[in-house]
Amino acid sequence: MTLFNRRQLLVGATGAAGVAAASVAGAGAAAATAAVPTATSPASAASHAAGTPRVRTGAERAAASRWSVLRGQRVGVITNPTGILTNLRTVVDEMHESRAVDIVGVFGPEHGFRGTAQAGDSEGTSIDPRTGLTVYDAYGADTTKMTELFRTAGVETVVFDIQDAGARFYTYIWTMYTAMRAAVTVGARFVVLDRPNPTGGTARGPMMTTPWTSGVGAKEIVQAHGMTVGELARYFDGEFLTADAGARLRDLTVVQVKGWSRRDTFADTGLPWVMPSPNMPTPDTALVYPGTGMFEGTNLSEGRGTTRPFELIGAPYVDYRWAERLSALGLPGVDFREAYFTPTFSKHVNLVCGGVQLHVTDGHRFDPIRAAVEMLVAARDLYDEFDWRYDSYDPARPYWIDKLTGSTRLRDQITAGATADEVVAAWRNELAAFESRRRRYLLYRG
Protein backbone atom coordinates (compact mmCIF):
# COMPACT_ATOMS: atom_id res chain seq x y z
CA MET A 1 0.00 0.00 0.00
CA THR A 2 1.27 3.43 -0.85
CA LEU A 3 1.52 5.79 2.10
CA PHE A 4 1.31 9.53 1.69
CA ASN A 5 2.57 12.27 3.97
CA ARG A 6 0.50 14.86 5.79
CA ARG A 7 0.44 17.42 2.97
CA GLN A 8 -0.62 15.08 0.18
CA LEU A 9 -4.21 14.44 -0.79
CA LEU A 10 -5.05 11.10 -2.30
CA VAL A 11 -7.89 11.10 -4.81
CA GLY A 12 -7.76 7.33 -5.38
CA ALA A 13 -5.76 4.62 -7.03
CA THR A 14 -6.01 4.13 -10.77
CA GLY A 15 -6.05 0.82 -12.57
CA ALA A 16 -7.47 -2.50 -11.52
CA ALA A 17 -4.49 -3.34 -9.32
CA GLY A 18 -4.35 -0.06 -7.42
CA VAL A 19 -4.94 -0.06 -3.69
CA ALA A 20 -4.72 3.38 -2.09
CA ALA A 21 -4.12 4.62 1.40
CA ALA A 22 -3.57 8.12 2.70
CA SER A 23 -1.08 8.35 5.53
CA VAL A 24 -0.71 11.35 7.74
CA ALA A 25 2.79 11.02 9.13
CA GLY A 26 4.44 13.20 11.75
CA ALA A 27 7.92 14.68 11.46
CA GLY A 28 10.50 12.00 10.90
CA ALA A 29 8.01 9.26 10.12
CA ALA A 30 9.03 7.30 7.05
CA ALA A 31 6.75 6.74 4.10
CA ALA A 32 6.73 3.17 2.85
CA THR A 33 5.35 1.18 -0.06
CA ALA A 34 4.18 -2.42 0.13
CA ALA A 35 3.28 -4.56 -2.86
CA VAL A 36 -0.40 -5.42 -3.10
CA PRO A 37 -1.52 -8.50 -5.01
CA THR A 38 -4.12 -8.07 -7.69
CA ALA A 39 -5.88 -11.28 -6.77
CA THR A 40 -8.57 -11.05 -4.14
CA SER A 41 -8.11 -12.68 -0.75
CA PRO A 42 -10.14 -15.79 0.14
CA ALA A 43 -12.43 -13.52 2.14
CA SER A 44 -12.99 -11.22 -0.82
CA ALA A 45 -13.64 -14.10 -3.17
CA ALA A 46 -16.73 -15.11 -1.21
CA SER A 47 -18.73 -12.07 -2.31
CA HIS A 48 -22.50 -11.96 -2.73
CA ALA A 49 -24.00 -14.16 -5.40
CA ALA A 50 -25.48 -11.01 -6.90
CA GLY A 51 -21.98 -9.82 -7.80
CA THR A 52 -19.27 -7.59 -6.46
CA PRO A 53 -20.46 -4.20 -5.15
CA ARG A 54 -19.50 -1.16 -7.18
CA VAL A 55 -17.81 0.34 -4.13
CA ARG A 56 -14.97 -1.38 -2.25
CA THR A 57 -14.45 -0.46 1.38
CA GLY A 58 -11.13 0.19 3.03
CA ALA A 59 -11.49 -3.10 4.89
CA GLU A 60 -12.01 -5.04 1.67
CA ARG A 61 -8.93 -3.47 0.12
CA ALA A 62 -6.82 -4.14 3.19
CA ALA A 63 -7.97 -7.77 3.23
CA ALA A 64 -7.03 -8.11 -0.47
CA SER A 65 -3.45 -7.19 0.48
CA ARG A 66 -3.42 -9.84 3.23
CA TRP A 67 -3.55 -7.01 5.78
CA SER A 68 -0.11 -5.74 4.79
CA VAL A 69 -0.82 -2.32 6.33
CA LEU A 70 -0.99 -4.01 9.75
CA ARG A 71 1.69 -6.64 9.47
CA GLY A 72 4.31 -6.88 12.21
CA GLN A 73 2.42 -4.68 14.70
CA ARG A 74 0.44 -5.24 17.88
CA VAL A 75 -3.04 -4.21 16.76
CA GLY A 76 -6.08 -3.01 18.70
CA VAL A 77 -9.31 -2.99 16.69
CA ILE A 78 -12.23 -0.64 17.35
CA THR A 79 -15.20 -2.11 15.51
CA ASN A 80 -18.74 -3.44 15.73
CA PRO A 81 -21.01 -5.61 13.53
CA THR A 82 -20.63 -3.15 10.62
CA GLY A 83 -16.93 -3.93 10.32
CA ILE A 84 -17.45 -6.61 7.67
CA LEU A 85 -16.15 -7.72 4.31
CA THR A 86 -18.39 -8.52 1.36
CA ASN A 87 -18.60 -12.13 2.54
CA LEU A 88 -20.40 -10.68 5.61
CA ARG A 89 -17.72 -11.86 8.04
CA THR A 90 -16.23 -9.43 10.54
CA VAL A 91 -12.79 -7.96 10.03
CA VAL A 92 -11.76 -9.25 13.45
CA ASP A 93 -12.66 -12.83 12.60
CA GLU A 94 -10.93 -12.54 9.22
CA MET A 95 -7.78 -10.90 10.62
CA HIS A 96 -7.58 -13.46 13.42
CA GLU A 97 -8.00 -16.47 11.15
CA SER A 98 -5.57 -15.11 8.56
CA ARG A 99 -2.74 -15.20 11.14
CA ALA A 100 -1.39 -12.12 9.36
CA VAL A 101 -2.48 -9.70 12.10
CA ASP A 102 -1.43 -9.79 15.75
CA ILE A 103 -4.62 -8.59 17.44
CA VAL A 104 -3.96 -7.77 21.09
CA GLY A 105 -7.41 -6.44 21.87
CA VAL A 106 -10.81 -5.49 20.48
CA PHE A 107 -12.52 -2.33 21.71
CA GLY A 108 -16.31 -2.16 21.71
CA PRO A 109 -18.15 1.18 21.27
CA GLU A 110 -21.76 1.95 22.21
CA HIS A 111 -23.91 -1.17 21.60
CA GLY A 112 -20.79 -3.35 21.84
CA PHE A 113 -18.46 -5.27 19.53
CA ARG A 114 -21.10 -7.88 18.62
CA GLY A 115 -23.94 -5.32 18.78
CA THR A 116 -26.11 -6.80 21.53
CA ALA A 117 -26.64 -3.65 23.66
CA GLN A 118 -29.36 -1.02 23.30
CA ALA A 119 -28.87 2.76 23.05
CA GLY A 120 -26.74 4.22 25.82
CA ASP A 121 -25.36 0.81 26.81
CA SER A 122 -22.44 -1.51 26.07
CA GLU A 123 -21.48 -5.17 26.36
CA GLY A 124 -18.82 -4.77 29.04
CA THR A 125 -15.33 -6.31 28.99
CA SER A 126 -15.18 -10.01 28.20
CA ILE A 127 -13.45 -12.76 26.24
CA ASP A 128 -14.86 -13.21 22.76
CA PRO A 129 -15.94 -16.86 22.47
CA ARG A 130 -15.13 -17.17 18.76
CA THR A 131 -11.60 -15.79 18.75
CA GLY A 132 -10.53 -15.91 22.39
CA LEU A 133 -9.57 -12.24 22.16
CA THR A 134 -10.18 -9.80 24.99
CA VAL A 135 -12.94 -7.34 24.12
CA TYR A 136 -12.58 -4.14 26.13
CA ASP A 137 -15.56 -1.91 26.90
CA ALA A 138 -14.66 1.45 25.32
CA TYR A 139 -18.10 3.08 25.38
CA GLY A 140 -18.04 6.28 27.39
CA ALA A 141 -14.30 5.99 28.00
CA ASP A 142 -12.51 9.32 28.33
CA THR A 143 -8.95 9.79 27.08
CA THR A 144 -7.43 8.63 30.38
CA LYS A 145 -9.47 5.44 30.39
CA MET A 146 -8.85 4.74 26.69
CA THR A 147 -5.11 5.27 27.21
CA GLU A 148 -5.20 2.79 30.09
CA LEU A 149 -6.99 0.23 27.90
CA PHE A 150 -4.44 0.63 25.10
CA ARG A 151 -1.53 0.24 27.52
CA THR A 152 -3.11 -2.79 29.20
CA ALA A 153 -3.50 -4.47 25.80
CA GLY A 154 -0.07 -3.34 24.57
CA VAL A 155 -1.45 -1.64 21.44
CA GLU A 156 1.04 -0.29 18.89
CA THR A 157 -1.49 0.34 16.10
CA VAL A 158 -5.13 1.30 16.54
CA VAL A 159 -7.52 0.26 13.76
CA PHE A 160 -10.95 1.89 13.41
CA ASP A 161 -13.55 0.18 11.21
CA ILE A 162 -17.16 1.19 11.88
CA GLN A 163 -19.94 2.29 9.53
CA ASP A 164 -20.92 5.82 10.57
CA ALA A 165 -24.41 7.29 10.05
CA GLY A 166 -23.25 10.77 9.03
CA ALA A 167 -24.66 12.77 11.96
CA ARG A 168 -22.71 14.63 14.63
CA PHE A 169 -24.78 13.08 17.39
CA TYR A 170 -23.98 9.50 16.36
CA THR A 171 -21.42 8.47 18.98
CA TYR A 172 -18.97 6.32 17.01
CA ILE A 173 -17.01 9.27 15.62
CA TRP A 174 -16.43 10.51 19.17
CA THR A 175 -15.18 7.09 20.23
CA MET A 176 -12.76 7.45 17.31
CA TYR A 177 -11.66 10.91 18.44
CA THR A 178 -11.08 9.74 22.01
CA ALA A 179 -9.04 6.83 20.64
CA MET A 180 -7.02 9.25 18.52
CA ARG A 181 -6.19 11.32 21.63
CA ALA A 182 -5.18 8.16 23.47
CA ALA A 183 -3.06 7.06 20.49
CA VAL A 184 -1.13 10.33 20.71
CA THR A 185 -0.46 9.66 24.40
CA VAL A 186 0.83 6.11 23.87
CA GLY A 187 2.58 6.91 20.55
CA ALA A 188 0.48 4.46 18.53
CA ARG A 189 -0.25 4.51 14.82
CA PHE A 190 -3.87 5.09 13.83
CA VAL A 191 -5.38 3.30 10.84
CA VAL A 192 -8.89 3.97 9.52
CA LEU A 193 -10.45 1.37 7.23
CA ASP A 194 -12.75 3.81 5.51
CA ARG A 195 -16.41 3.35 4.61
CA PRO A 196 -18.87 5.55 2.67
CA ASN A 197 -20.90 8.22 4.38
CA PRO A 198 -24.41 6.75 3.85
CA THR A 199 -25.99 10.20 3.46
CA GLY A 200 -23.50 11.43 0.83
CA GLY A 201 -20.84 14.09 1.02
CA THR A 202 -22.88 17.27 1.54
CA ALA A 203 -22.42 19.17 4.82
CA ARG A 204 -25.58 20.56 6.43
CA GLY A 205 -26.89 22.12 9.59
CA PRO A 206 -25.71 24.14 12.58
CA MET A 207 -22.27 24.15 14.18
CA MET A 208 -21.58 22.71 17.61
CA THR A 209 -20.52 25.42 20.08
CA THR A 210 -18.10 24.76 22.93
CA PRO A 211 -20.50 25.26 25.88
CA TRP A 212 -22.75 22.49 24.55
CA THR A 213 -20.21 19.77 23.74
CA SER A 214 -21.03 16.31 25.11
CA GLY A 215 -20.90 12.66 24.15
CA VAL A 216 -23.31 13.43 21.29
CA GLY A 217 -21.11 16.21 19.92
CA ALA A 218 -17.64 16.49 21.42
CA LYS A 219 -16.08 18.99 19.01
CA GLU A 220 -17.03 21.85 16.70
CA ILE A 221 -18.35 20.29 13.50
CA VAL A 222 -21.72 20.79 11.80
CA GLN A 223 -24.70 18.53 12.40
CA ALA A 224 -24.43 16.56 9.13
CA HIS A 225 -20.69 16.66 8.46
CA GLY A 226 -20.82 15.04 5.01
CA MET A 227 -17.48 13.28 5.53
CA THR A 228 -16.33 9.68 5.75
CA VAL A 229 -14.75 8.58 9.02
CA GLY A 230 -11.38 8.66 7.27
CA GLU A 231 -11.90 12.27 6.27
CA LEU A 232 -13.11 13.09 9.77
CA ALA A 233 -9.99 11.51 11.25
CA ARG A 234 -7.87 13.77 9.04
CA TYR A 235 -9.98 16.77 10.10
CA PHE A 236 -9.74 15.90 13.80
CA ASP A 237 -5.98 15.38 13.49
CA GLY A 238 -5.45 18.70 11.73
CA GLU A 239 -7.93 20.88 13.62
CA PHE A 240 -8.22 19.58 17.18
CA LEU A 241 -5.55 17.14 18.36
CA THR A 242 -2.71 19.57 19.00
CA ALA A 243 -4.89 21.67 21.31
CA ASP A 244 -6.47 18.66 23.05
CA ALA A 245 -3.64 16.13 23.14
CA GLY A 246 -0.53 18.28 22.79
CA ALA A 247 0.43 16.88 19.38
CA ARG A 248 -0.88 15.36 16.22
CA LEU A 249 -0.80 11.63 15.56
CA ARG A 250 2.60 10.14 14.84
CA ASP A 251 1.09 8.30 11.86
CA LEU A 252 -2.47 8.43 10.53
CA THR A 253 -3.30 6.07 7.68
CA VAL A 254 -6.62 6.03 5.86
CA VAL A 255 -7.23 3.00 3.64
CA GLN A 256 -9.61 4.60 1.20
CA VAL A 257 -12.89 3.46 -0.25
CA LYS A 258 -12.68 2.83 -3.98
CA GLY A 259 -15.51 3.88 -6.28
CA TRP A 260 -17.38 6.24 -3.93
CA SER A 261 -18.16 9.84 -4.84
CA ARG A 262 -19.60 12.59 -2.67
CA ARG A 263 -22.93 12.43 -4.47
CA ASP A 264 -23.45 8.77 -3.59
CA THR A 265 -25.79 7.67 -0.85
CA PHE A 266 -25.55 4.16 0.56
CA ALA A 267 -28.09 2.86 -1.95
CA ASP A 268 -25.66 3.76 -4.74
CA THR A 269 -22.79 1.65 -3.36
CA GLY A 270 -24.11 -1.88 -3.80
CA LEU A 271 -22.73 -2.72 -0.36
CA PRO A 272 -24.66 -4.81 2.17
CA TRP A 273 -26.21 -2.76 4.97
CA VAL A 274 -25.55 -3.93 8.52
CA MET A 275 -27.35 -2.09 11.30
CA PRO A 276 -24.76 0.21 12.93
CA SER A 277 -27.01 0.24 16.01
CA PRO A 278 -30.34 -1.38 16.95
CA ASN A 279 -32.32 1.71 15.94
CA MET A 280 -30.62 2.21 12.56
CA PRO A 281 -32.21 -0.70 10.66
CA THR A 282 -31.98 0.51 7.04
CA PRO A 283 -30.09 2.96 4.82
CA ASP A 284 -33.31 5.03 4.73
CA THR A 285 -33.01 5.42 8.50
CA ALA A 286 -29.55 6.87 8.01
CA LEU A 287 -30.87 9.33 5.42
CA VAL A 288 -33.43 10.85 7.78
CA TYR A 289 -31.48 10.53 11.04
CA PRO A 290 -29.38 13.76 10.85
CA GLY A 291 -32.71 15.60 10.95
CA THR A 292 -35.23 13.46 12.79
CA GLY A 293 -32.66 12.57 15.42
CA MET A 294 -33.52 16.01 16.80
CA PHE A 295 -36.89 14.67 17.93
CA GLU A 296 -35.02 12.93 20.75
CA GLY A 297 -34.93 16.46 22.19
CA THR A 298 -38.74 16.84 22.14
CA ASN A 299 -41.74 15.18 23.76
CA LEU A 300 -42.59 13.45 20.47
CA SER A 301 -41.58 9.84 19.93
CA GLU A 302 -38.74 9.49 17.44
CA GLY A 303 -40.05 6.02 16.60
CA ARG A 304 -37.95 4.01 19.05
CA GLY A 305 -39.89 0.89 19.91
CA THR A 306 -41.15 0.53 16.33
CA THR A 307 -39.68 -1.15 13.28
CA ARG A 308 -39.09 2.26 11.65
CA PRO A 309 -37.24 4.41 14.21
CA PHE A 310 -36.53 7.99 13.07
CA GLU A 311 -38.83 7.50 10.07
CA LEU A 312 -41.95 7.35 12.25
CA ILE A 313 -42.39 10.48 14.37
CA GLY A 314 -45.40 11.28 16.53
CA ALA A 315 -47.13 11.61 19.89
CA PRO A 316 -50.54 10.84 21.42
CA TYR A 317 -51.61 14.45 20.85
CA VAL A 318 -50.76 14.55 17.11
CA ASP A 319 -53.49 14.15 14.50
CA TYR A 320 -53.91 14.21 10.71
CA ARG A 321 -53.22 17.95 10.46
CA TRP A 322 -49.44 17.51 10.84
CA ALA A 323 -49.17 15.23 7.81
CA GLU A 324 -51.44 17.51 5.77
CA ARG A 325 -49.36 20.60 6.52
CA LEU A 326 -46.03 18.89 5.85
CA SER A 327 -47.25 17.32 2.59
CA ALA A 328 -48.42 20.71 1.36
CA LEU A 329 -44.87 22.07 1.64
CA GLY A 330 -43.68 19.97 -1.31
CA LEU A 331 -40.19 19.48 0.12
CA PRO A 332 -37.81 17.92 -2.41
CA GLY A 333 -37.00 14.23 -2.10
CA VAL A 334 -39.47 13.32 0.65
CA ASP A 335 -43.15 12.55 1.13
CA PHE A 336 -45.01 12.55 4.46
CA ARG A 337 -47.58 9.84 5.16
CA GLU A 338 -50.13 10.15 7.95
CA ALA A 339 -49.24 7.34 10.35
CA TYR A 340 -50.28 5.82 13.68
CA PHE A 341 -48.05 3.60 15.83
CA THR A 342 -47.65 2.25 19.35
CA PRO A 343 -44.05 2.24 20.70
CA THR A 344 -43.10 -0.93 22.59
CA PHE A 345 -40.45 0.94 24.58
CA SER A 346 -39.01 4.44 25.09
CA LYS A 347 -41.30 7.49 24.86
CA HIS A 348 -45.08 6.94 24.95
CA VAL A 349 -44.64 3.21 25.44
CA ASN A 350 -47.89 1.29 24.79
CA LEU A 351 -49.72 4.50 23.79
CA VAL A 352 -51.15 5.09 20.32
CA CYS A 353 -49.28 7.96 18.66
CA GLY A 354 -50.46 9.95 15.70
CA GLY A 355 -47.83 11.35 13.40
CA VAL A 356 -46.04 10.90 10.11
CA GLN A 357 -43.75 8.51 8.35
CA LEU A 358 -41.08 10.09 6.16
CA HIS A 359 -40.72 8.37 2.78
CA VAL A 360 -37.49 9.45 1.08
CA THR A 361 -38.15 9.49 -2.66
CA ASP A 362 -34.83 10.98 -3.78
CA GLY A 363 -31.89 10.73 -1.40
CA HIS A 364 -29.81 13.09 -3.54
CA ARG A 365 -32.30 15.98 -3.22
CA PHE A 366 -33.53 15.32 0.30
CA ASP A 367 -32.30 17.67 3.07
CA PRO A 368 -33.03 15.87 6.36
CA ILE A 369 -32.28 18.84 8.61
CA ARG A 370 -34.48 21.26 6.66
CA ALA A 371 -37.27 18.66 6.71
CA ALA A 372 -36.96 18.19 10.47
CA VAL A 373 -37.01 21.95 11.08
CA GLU A 374 -40.24 22.20 9.06
CA MET A 375 -41.66 19.37 11.18
CA LEU A 376 -40.71 21.12 14.43
CA VAL A 377 -42.17 24.45 13.31
CA ALA A 378 -45.42 22.80 12.21
CA ALA A 379 -45.72 20.86 15.47
CA ARG A 380 -45.25 24.08 17.43
CA ASP A 381 -47.93 25.84 15.40
CA LEU A 382 -50.48 23.02 15.54
CA TYR A 383 -50.21 21.59 19.05
CA ASP A 384 -50.12 23.37 22.38
CA GLU A 385 -48.82 20.13 23.92
CA PHE A 386 -45.59 20.27 21.90
CA ASP A 387 -42.58 20.75 24.19
CA TRP A 388 -38.84 20.24 24.52
CA ARG A 389 -37.40 17.31 26.47
CA TYR A 390 -36.08 18.44 29.84
CA ASP A 391 -33.25 16.50 31.53
CA SER A 392 -33.01 17.33 35.21
CA TYR A 393 -29.80 15.27 35.61
CA ASP A 394 -27.84 18.12 33.96
CA PRO A 395 -29.26 21.27 35.60
CA ALA A 396 -26.81 23.61 33.89
CA ARG A 397 -27.78 22.28 30.44
CA PRO A 398 -31.20 20.70 30.88
CA TYR A 399 -32.52 20.70 27.31
CA TRP A 400 -31.37 17.74 25.21
CA ILE A 401 -32.15 19.57 21.96
CA ASP A 402 -29.39 22.09 22.74
CA LYS A 403 -26.80 19.28 22.93
CA LEU A 404 -28.09 17.80 19.69
CA THR A 405 -28.09 21.10 17.75
CA GLY A 406 -25.00 22.63 19.37
CA SER A 407 -26.51 25.66 21.13
CA THR A 408 -29.76 27.12 22.46
CA ARG A 409 -30.35 28.95 19.18
CA LEU A 410 -32.66 26.50 17.39
CA ARG A 411 -34.80 25.99 20.50
CA ASP A 412 -34.91 29.72 21.20
CA GLN A 413 -35.90 30.55 17.62
CA ILE A 414 -38.64 27.95 17.34
CA THR A 415 -40.02 28.80 20.78
CA ALA A 416 -40.11 32.48 19.78
CA GLY A 417 -42.12 31.76 16.62
CA ALA A 418 -39.42 31.75 13.92
CA THR A 419 -40.18 30.30 10.50
CA ALA A 420 -38.22 27.36 9.10
CA ASP A 421 -36.52 29.75 6.65
CA GLU A 422 -35.31 31.91 9.54
CA VAL A 423 -34.02 28.91 11.49
CA VAL A 424 -32.07 27.53 8.54
CA ALA A 425 -30.69 30.94 7.56
CA ALA A 426 -29.18 31.35 11.04
CA TRP A 427 -26.44 28.78 10.40
CA ARG A 428 -25.61 29.70 6.79
CA ASN A 429 -22.33 31.52 7.60
CA GLU A 430 -20.99 28.91 10.03
CA LEU A 431 -21.78 26.14 7.55
CA ALA A 432 -19.88 27.99 4.81
CA ALA A 433 -16.90 28.43 7.15
CA PHE A 434 -16.92 24.70 7.94
CA GLU A 435 -17.09 23.86 4.24
CA SER A 436 -14.00 25.98 3.67
CA ARG A 437 -12.06 24.42 6.56
CA ARG A 438 -12.87 20.83 5.72
CA ARG A 439 -11.83 21.11 2.07
CA ARG A 440 -8.15 20.29 2.64
CA TYR A 441 -9.04 17.06 4.46
CA LEU A 442 -11.39 15.58 1.85
CA LEU A 443 -10.32 12.44 0.00
CA TYR A 444 -13.16 11.88 -2.44
CA ARG A 445 -14.52 13.85 -5.37
CA GLY A 446 -17.95 14.13 -6.91
Image: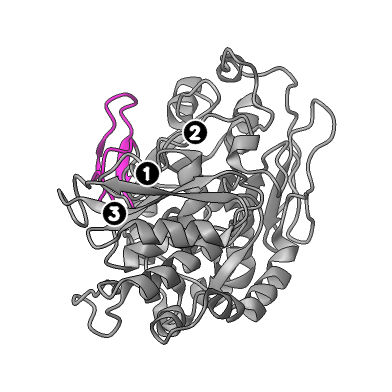
Determine the secondary structure under disc 3.
strand
Q: Nearer the viewer, residue 42 or 440?
A: 440
At label 2, counting other C-alpha atoms closer than 10 Å, the crowd grade (few under 14, some 14-19, many 20 or more) is some
**Circle 1: residue type:** Ser
Q: Position of residue 166 (x, y in %)?
A: 53, 54
Q: From the image, which quarter does the N terminus lie in?
A: top right
**What is the distance, in whole Å, between disc 2 and disc 1 at their CAs?**
11 Å
Q: Secondary structure at mark 2?
A: loop
Kind of residue sitting beneath label 2? Trp
Is residue 37 rendered to the left or right of residue 268? Answer: right
**In the rendered image, which residue does mark 2 sit on?**
273
- Residue 207 part of the magenta-drawn span: no
- Residue 403 lies, with reference to residue 22, above or below; the image says below
Instruction: Give the residue at the far left of this rendering.
Output: 350
Residue 158 seen: no
- Mark 1 and mark 3 lie on one chain; the one further toward the N terminus is 1
Q: Which residues are magenta?
A: 114-139
Q: Which residue is mark 3?
A: 354
The x, y position of residue 367, in whole percent, is: 59, 58
| Residue 35 picture location, percent across and down | 75, 29
Task: Please say if the residues under marks 2 and 1 sit with CB atoms less than 8 Å apart.
Answer: no
The image's colour scheme reads one colour
Q: Which residue is mark 1?
A: 277
Q: Is residue 119 visible?
A: yes
**Is label 1 in a helix, a strand or a loop?**
loop
Q: Is residue 118 magenta?
A: yes
Which residue is rendered at x = 73% and y = 45% of the image?
261
* Foreground pick, 385 / 28: 385
